[in-house]
Image: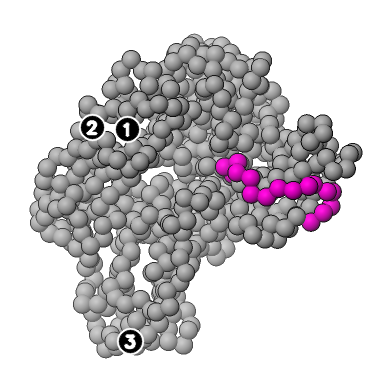
Amino acid sequence: MKIQINRCFPVLLLFVFFFPSDVLFGQEQVIPIGSNAQIKTYLHNPESQNLRRSSLPGDTVTLPFVDDFSKPGIYPDNALWADSDAFINETFCVAPPTIGVATLDGIDQYGIPYDSTAGVDGLADHLTSRPIYLQPFLGDTTVWLSFFYQPRGLGDEPDAPDSLGLEFKDSLNAWHHIWSVPGRGDTAFKRMNFHINDSDYLYNGFQFRFYNIATINGNRDHWNIDYVILQNNTKENDSIPDNALINPQHSLLSEFSAMPYTHYKNLSSQASAMVTSINDTVHDINYGQTSYAPEISVEDQTGSVIFSNGIGSINSYFSNNFVPFTIPVSPFVFPSNPGDSADFTVKVILGPTGSQTNVNNDTSTYHQHFYNYYAYDDGSAEFAYGVSGNTDVKIACRYNVKMKDTLRGIQIYFNWVGPNVHTKLFQLAVWDQINVNGNSDNLLYKMINQKPANVDSINGFATYLFDDSTNALVLNPGNYYFGFIQNDPTTLYGVGLDRNTDAHSNVFYHLDGFWRNTQVIGALMIRPLFGDSIRRHTISVQEISNVIPGFQLYPNPANESFRMDFKNTDAHSYRYEVLNILGSVLLRGEAIPGEQILIDQLKAGMYFVRLSDVKNRLSSTQKLLIN
């Protein structure tokens, strides 16, 4: 069996990883994702406004210039950086110096490819410092720039044609190449140091910038940058004294990242569904002998602390030391509040003795959601997973359902892998038994004539709803397998793959007559939906399909306006609505074929346009991309 990395979306060129197997046919494939739905969601989420880019400060930055990218938000800190190409995150890196990195890739600040049709490398992201006041240090020999960088991490490997580079701007506003490194496959962070003692750079307004050369057709060719320091009175490999966490937090549920709140509350032993402890690591960066007191806290939706626990003081005896620790969580359980959903915030904090000047890296945060779905993934897709072969391609994700309930639908993150996959049909499927050893299964239900959809909603999930009256399934507690059957086995259907969570023991695929358990490490982004009603907060794939004849949007993508074509059989009976990805109506009005609809007040991103025939009670929904 071969596991492959897809290099270029349009032509599906493949880079191969080999795993030992007695299966000599069939292909599991790991595919770079086509965009960044986290950025798109962030741009459309009103709650993110306070974390977005602010207006640029007017003055130059003074030393020290220090950023470890642990500040909340997906864009670089505007007080230090002049552009927004880099993606600030905790999920694309492996063992960073501190929690959070700046990732350079092949997509722009809006989460879309620079050129979705490109198959060759090009200049992609920049991470450019704001102008820095270095004039007082003319003749000073103690000014150094240092940073850590990592190729690939948990993302896509930058190959030899790809590169990461550094440039300095001189007093005549000319940029000079200082350093670059070609792509490679390892994931180790490496530190670089640059002595700034040239008079061309010691002036008021000096800037430096990182850039990357990548295949610019998707979210690929990743480089992670961490802990950038520009300082005087320092030396090579010197650091700002700091104690920092390095790992993102995960679910406090032992089996899932999320589960329906009603199912959790119905457990006979909620304690059995919880982890008993959490693990993390502190990085003692140039601090020397010190101590800190890690603790965990859980807050409810009002911000009230409902649980906290610490382990007292622990010690680090020398600089650049990594100190692991464990904090007990038991006997905590999430409370059973009224309602069918709940949100909690889990924080791990170094404690008062560990707090340094940079307090952002002293805390890591995880949002524990209880809604209407089961999930193993953390909501971020670093890759996509697919199977292609000769015949009988099926993909299934196993969940142990905890209570009798109605299965209302399935959410799937389908990766943008090329222009033709969206025209392919598949069958949504539910099995109540898959036996790898016996090579048998029992198909409980399937829904035919479905299409892969890329919905730019929360992390790109497409929602497939079962018919309420005839197709709803009442499932008893037990193991079920949710997934799909490919009508075209040779076409690659990419499903989101979370590399930060490992649930591969629950992922199965069927190919050429045989069921197998996947060998790809990660969590497949397939989520079954349960409950009395799940239509709130979702726009289903069925709602995107055409019901009103001839309904089309043009131009699409649009800039400041768009028009609609449809067969208007009854004047004044058609209305339109423009909705955001959360289903909120932003614009509405009478729909007239060919009439201009202004959208210049809407931000760039994905929207939905719903056309309603009021008289005949018909409606259709189309996706609209605004540039």
- Identify the residue under disc 2: 329
Q: Position of residue 317 (x, y in %)?
A: 9, 53
Q: Residues within 10 Å of mark 2 (few under 14, many from 20)?
A: some
**Which of disc 2 and disc 3 is earlier in sequence?**
3
Residue occupying the point 40% across, 26% down: 338
Alpha carbon of mark 2 to alpha carbon of mark 1: how far?
A: 8 Å
The secondary structure that most of the magenta stretch takes on is loop
**Residue 474 visible in this rendered orientation of the protein:** yes
In the image, farthest residue toward the right: 569
Toward which corner of the image does residue 106 lie, by quadrant? bottom right
Q: Is residue 402 above or below residue 335?
A: above
- Identify the residue under disc 3: 135
Magenta span: 581-596
Which dot, 3 or 2, sits closer to the camera?
A: 2
Q: Is residue 32 above or below residue 339?
A: below
Asked whether 107 or 569 is in front, the reply is 569
- Identify the residue under disc 1: 252
Asked whether 181 or 202 is in front, the reply is 202
Q: Is residue 465 left or right of residue 345?
A: right
**Which of disc 3 and disc 1 is earlier in sequence?**
3
Q: Position of residue 104 (x, y in %)?
A: 46, 58
